[in-house]
Image: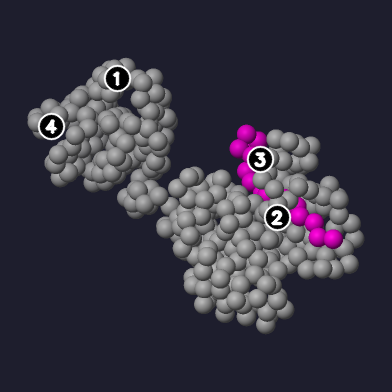
Amino acid sequence: MNIHEYQGKQILKSFGVRIQEGIVADTPEQAVEAAKKLKEDFGSDWVVVKAQIHAGGRGKGGGVKLAKNLDEVKQRASDIIGMQLITPQTGAEGKKVNKVLIAQDVYYPGESETKEFYVSVLLDRSRGRNIIMYSTEGGMDIEEVAEHTPHLIFKEEIDPKVGLQGFQTRKIAFNLGLSGNAFKEMTKFIAALYKAYEATDSSMFEINPVLKTSDDKILAVDAKVDLDDNGLFRHPDYAAMRDTSEEDPTEVEASESNLNYVKLDGNVGCMVNGAGLAMATMDIIKIAGGEPANFLDVGGTANATTVKAAFNIILKDPNVKAILINIFGGIVRCDRVAQGVIDAYKEIGDIRVPIIVRLQGTNAEEAKKLIDESGLKVFSAILLKEAADLVSEVLA
């Protein structure tokens, strides 16, 4: 689950990570009050107005602006709130900005120069270990750094038996070229960041940039946090941070019905039980000359109600030209799936796309009988190859 920058910073701060302080605002008037509060608490004459959406590259799209006085705060907030912000990560359609973060200016003058770094903590699935990835090239897209200057990206692997060690935090600070108080501050920052990552059951913490201020403080200027959905039952306070307005409405509806659904750009909708079978079904669709319109796993305990909800969700996609239902009845009974298809078909009414159903396993014969006697225009298949041939036929 993705969360906003201001929410990620709240989590980081609760674990002792120094952050760029800020206050979230929904209106230009709230933004002005937030700027006044920051001046009162931190002496910030200038503030940064930052769009809050689930995407990176906000500055490139005009979603991050410096404001030097209250009039500029109000104007910048008015310009950003409500805009359709397009970044390299949003696609051409962009995302609507509903709120902004009014953040303190941390690029103040001092005895030494400021310096930006990149730091992230994530899981290396191939190694089964957490890693800290970091670079001296903060503030830039890490993909560009990896492509053009890969030698400037460092990785520190964490042994899960012993956790992050002091020598590793010092190695990171050394590789970033720090010394003196900034060196000590960075070791504390890394230790607190890793603690936050582990304690929150996160999939990724990405801080870009991590800033060394002119007075040698180390702090998070940005925070991109991806919380592991499977761990949210242990963190109801984090689960409450979910912003469904940032998600695809169809995917939100699917999650409410306990369906694993991801919208794709193809023309063949698919309903399957089990992630492995779903991937195989998507391969079959491509072999047959189509393109998957979605990934939809109804799960091993699907019933008629679940299947009906899945059917409705697939049909909401106007790009779908055919539907392939491929169910293996292990725990789930095929006759329940068949009944769900029949109920959804009758409720929706005039369905103009062909439907191919392959049901194998528990009560498969009963399921076939239900569909055959329903009078619905449904193509039935036994083998995967037959299903693929039918997909080719209906798309021709």
* Left or right relative to 327: residue 21: right
Taking depth in this image into account, of 85 and 285 the one nearest to the observer is: 85
Q: Does the residue at mark 3 contact the one at mark 1 (Cβ under 8 Å)?
A: no
Q: Position of residue 364 (x, y in %)?
A: 22, 28
Of the numbered discs 4 and 1, the one sitting upstream in the chain is 4
Instruction: Give the vertical position of 151 relative to 93 (above or below).
Output: above
Q: Position of residue 314 (x, y in %)?
A: 30, 40
Q: CA distance from mark 3 to mark 4?
A: 51 Å
Q: Which residue is mark 1?
A: 392
- Disc ID at residue 143: 3
Of the numbered discs 1 and 2, the one sitting upstream in the chain is 2
Q: Secondary structure at mark 2?
A: strand
Q: Which residue is mark 2?
A: 209
Q: CA distance from mark 4 to mark 1?
A: 20 Å
Of the numbered discs 2 and 4, the one sitting upstream in the chain is 2
Q: Does the residue at mark 3 contact the one at mark 4 (Cβ under 8 Å)?
A: no
Taking depth in this image into account, of 87 and 250 the one nearest to the observer is: 87
Q: Residues within 10 Å of mark 1 (few under 14, many from 20)?
A: some
Name the image quarter holding residue 329: top left
- Disc ID at residue 83: none
The amino acid at mark 4 is Leu
Of the numbered discs 3 and 2, the one sitting upstream in the chain is 3
Of the numbered discs 3 and 1, the one sitting upstream in the chain is 3
The magenta region covers: 113-132
Please report the residue visible at 55 percent of the width from the left and 49 percent of the height from the top.
Answer: 87
Q: CA distance from mark 2 to mark 4?
A: 58 Å
Q: Let me know if residue 256 is in the magenta part.
A: no
* Prevailing secondary structure class for the magenta stretch in the rendered image: strand
Q: Secondary structure at mark 1?
A: helix
Q: CA distance from mark 3 to mark 2?
A: 14 Å
Q: Which residue is mark 4?
A: 376
Please report the residue visible at 35 percent of the width from the left and 25 percent of the height from the top.
Answer: 290
